[in-house]
Image (cartoon, grey):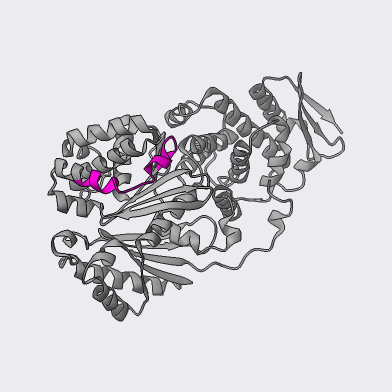
C-alpha cells in the first residue's frame, strides 16, 4: 500500500524527454519518451520503412534503395530530437547493420552526418533488451520472449525479472522471405533447421510465450478481428496456445485473402505475414507453451528500462502510471490513498494482485471530473480501456475500466460496457461494481477533499453494512450521501445502517 506521506513529497522538477532511434532491418524509428520514470510514455513515435535488410541474404550488403531513405529519416529524427531538448538520445542499430558487409561504413556515415554516436547491438544485447521490454510491462513474465524483426529472431527465457538462456537466429521476416522466395515448404525447412539448434525450448513447456515485433502484432490484430474480440488493444492480448495455433494455421492456409480483409493492418507487412504466422506456429509446436501473449513492448522499451535507476526499475508500472495521471488531472490526488484504506473493510482477504488493481481504481477515480456529467462515465470507461497501461492483462484492464465506470453510474446498458463485462467472471463483476459504488460514496461523503474521509468509518458485518460519521460535523449531512450508501449496500447485499460517532 502507498505510504501515508506519498502525496506530501515535493513536486519533482520537470523531466526532460529521452529519445531512442532504432535502426532496424525493416524500419527506422524514433520514439521520444517523456522522461525517466517507471512507465515509458511516448511523446513522439514515427517510423520510416527503409527495408535495409531486404537484400542482405542475396548480396551480403544493405539494400541500396533503402540506404538513402535511412539517411534521410535519421537526419530528420536527429534534428527533431535536438529541437526537443532531450536529456539523452540513444541511437541503436540491430541485425541488418550487424551482419551486412557495409554495415560499419553505413553507421560511420550516420555518425559523420548527424554528429551522433551509434551503438551497434550484438545479438545478446538485442535479445536482452527485447526481454526487458516485455518485463518492463509484465513484471511477472515467465516463459519465452520471442522478438521477430526483419533480420533476426531473438529468443530469451525469462522469469523473476531475469534473463536466462538466449539466442539470436537469422530468421527475420525479410531474410526468411528472401531465402525461401515465398515458398512455404522451403520456409518450413529453414525454420526447422534453425530452431533445431535451440537447446532450451523444452524449458518453456507449460509456460508463456511472449510474441514481440510488428509482424506478430499484425497477426494479433487479425486474430482480434476474426474473433470479434471486444477489446481492440494489442498489448497483452493473449490466447491459449492451442487456439492461437489453430488461428495461425487458418492465416497460413488462407494467406492474403484473409489478411487483406482486416482493417488497420499495414499494407507493407501483408506479403510477409503468412511467413510470420508459419514461424510463430512452429515455435508454439516446438516450445509447447500454455499461453501466447502479444506484447507491444520490445527492444526500445528494454533500452529505456535498463537506463532507469534501480529504485525506479523496482517500481510498479501500473501504479506509477496511475499516480502520474492522478497528479496531472485529479482535483485532490492525495485522496486516492485515503479511499483505498477507507473501503478496505469491504474486501477482507483480497489478494495482493486484486488490491493493486483496486488501488489503481482509487487513484484514477477522479481524473475525469472535468468531463461533461452526461458522458463522464462513458468517457472514463473508454479512456481507461485504451490508455497505454503497463502491467495488466485484458481481464484486469476491463475490470479497472469498469470499476471507474461504476464510480459514476450504475447503468450497465452501454454495448461497450456489456462487451467488457463479458470478459469477467461473475465474482469479478460483483467486485468492480462494489469498488465503483464505494468510490462514489467516498467522493460524495468528502467532496474529494483530503482528510475528511478518515473521520468516517465503513464496516461490513455479517448482518449489516455500517457507515459511521461524526455527529457534530455539518459536512456529513445524511441527505447528501444516503442514496450512495444504499447503493453500496445493495452491491454487497446487506442492509445499510448509519451510525454517529
Residue 253 coordinates in the image, percent (x, y): 18, 33
Q: Is residue 197 rendered magenta in the image?
A: yes
Residue 258 visible? The answer is no
Q: Quadrant of the C terminus?
A: top right
- Which of these two is toward me, 339 or 90? 90
In the rendered image, the vertical position of residue 479 relative to residue 493, given as above or below? below
Left or right of 424, for residue 62: left
Q: Quadrant of the N terminus?
A: top right
The residue range painted magenta reads 190-209
Q: Is residue 207 rendered magenta in the image?
A: yes
- Which of these two is toward me, 414 or 1? 1
In this rendering, the count of numbered labels is 0
Left or right of 454, for residue 269: left
Residue 276 coordinates in the image, percent (x, y): 25, 45
Which residue is drawn at the image coordinates 33% and 45% (left, top)? 217
Residue 344 coordinates in the image, percent (x, y): 71, 35
Which residue is drawn at the image coordinates 60% and 29% (left, top)? 431
Residue 342 coordinates in the image, percent (x, y): 73, 38
Residue 31 visible? The answer is yes
In the rendered image, the vertical position of residue 464 relative to residue 90, given as above or below? above
Which residue is drawn at the image coordinates 14% and 64% (left, top)? 59
Amino acid at each position: 500500500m502507498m505510504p501515508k506521506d506519498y502525496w506530501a513529497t515535493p513536486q519533482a522538477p520537470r523531466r526532460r524527454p529521452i529519445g531512442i532511434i532504432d535502426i532496424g532491418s525493416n524500419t527506422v524509428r524514433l520514439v521520444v519518451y517523456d522522461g525517466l520514470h517507471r512507465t515509458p510514455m511516448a511523446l513522439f513515435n514515427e517510423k520510416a520503412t527503409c527495408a535495409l535488410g531486404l537484400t542482405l541474404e542475396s548480396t551480403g550488403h544493405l539494400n541500396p534503395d533503402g540506404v538513402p531513405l535511412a539517411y534521410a529519416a535519421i537526419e530528420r529524427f536527429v534534428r527533431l530530437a535536438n529541437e526537443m531538448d532531450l536529456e539523452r538520445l540513444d541511437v541503436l542499430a540491430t541485425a541488418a547493420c550487424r551482419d551486412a558487409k557495409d554495415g560499419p561504413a553505413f553507421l560511420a556515415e550516420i555518425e559523420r552526418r548527424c554528429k551522433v554516436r551509434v551503438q551497434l547491438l550484438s545479438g545478446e544485447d538485442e535479445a536482452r533488451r527485447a526481454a526487458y521490454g516485455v518485463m518492463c510491462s509484465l513484471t511477472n513474465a515467465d516463459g519465452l520472449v520471442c522478438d521477430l524483426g526483419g533480420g533476426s529472431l531473438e529468443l530469451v527465457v525469462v522469469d523473476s525479472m531475469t534473463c536466462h538462456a538466449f539466442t539470436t537466429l537469422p530468421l527475420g521476416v525479410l531474410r526468411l522471405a528472401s531465402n525461401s522466395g515465398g515458398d512455404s515448404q522451403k520456409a518450413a525447412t529453414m525454420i526447422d533447421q534453425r530452431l533445431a539448434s535451440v537447446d532450451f525450448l523444452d524449458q518453456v513447456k507449460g509456460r508463456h510465450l511472449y510474441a514481440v515485433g510488428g509482424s506478430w502484432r499484425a497477426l494479433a490484430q487479425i486474430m482480434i478481428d476474426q474473433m470479434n474480440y471486444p477489446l481492440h488493444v494489442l498489448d497483452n492480448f493473449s490466447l491459449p496456445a492451442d487456439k492461437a495455433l489453430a488461428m495461425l494455421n487458418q492465416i497460413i492456409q488462407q494467406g492474403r485473402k484473409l489478411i487483406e480483409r482486416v482493417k488497420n493492418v499495414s499494407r507493407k507487412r501483408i506479403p510477409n505475414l503468412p511467413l510470420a504466422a508459419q514461424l510463430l506456429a512452429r515455435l508454439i509446436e516446438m516450445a509447447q507453451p500454455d499461453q501466447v501473449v502479444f506484447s507491444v513492448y520490445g527492444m526500445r522499451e528494454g533500452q529505456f528500462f535498463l537506463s532507469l535507476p534501480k529504485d525506479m526499475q523496482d517500481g510498479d508500472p501500473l501504479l506509477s502510471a496511475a499516480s502520474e495521471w492522478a497528479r496531472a488531472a485529479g482535483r485532490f490526488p492525495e485522496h486516492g490513498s485515503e479511499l483505498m484504506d477507507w473501503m478496505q473493510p469491504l474486501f477482507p482477504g483480497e489478494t495482493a494482485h486484486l488490491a493493486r488493481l483496486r488501488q489503481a481504481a482509487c487513484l484514477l477515480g477522479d481524473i475525469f471530473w472535468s468531463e461533461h456529467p452526461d458522458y463522464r462515465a462513458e468517457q472514463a470507461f473508454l479512456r481507461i480501456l485504451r490508455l497505454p497501461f503497463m502491467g495488466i492483462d485484458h481481464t484486469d484492464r476491463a475490470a479497472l475500466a469498469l470499476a471507474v465506470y461504476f464510480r459514476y453510474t450504475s447503468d450497465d446498458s452501454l454495448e461497450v460496457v456489456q462487451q467488457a463485462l463479458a470478459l469477467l467472471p461473475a465474482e469479478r463483476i460483483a467486485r468492480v461494481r462494489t469498488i465503483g459504488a464505494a468510490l462514489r460514496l467516498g467522493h460524495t461523503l468528502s467532496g474529494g477533499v483530503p482528510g475528511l474521509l478518515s473521520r468516517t468509518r465503513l464496516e461490513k458485518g455479517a448482518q449489516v453494512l455500517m457507515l459511521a460519521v461524526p455527529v457534530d460535523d455539518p459536512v456529513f449531512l445524511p441527505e447528501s450521501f444516503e442514496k450512495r450508501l444504499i447503493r453500496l449496500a445493495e452491491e454487497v447485499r446487506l442492509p445499510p445502517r448509519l451510525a454517529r460517532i
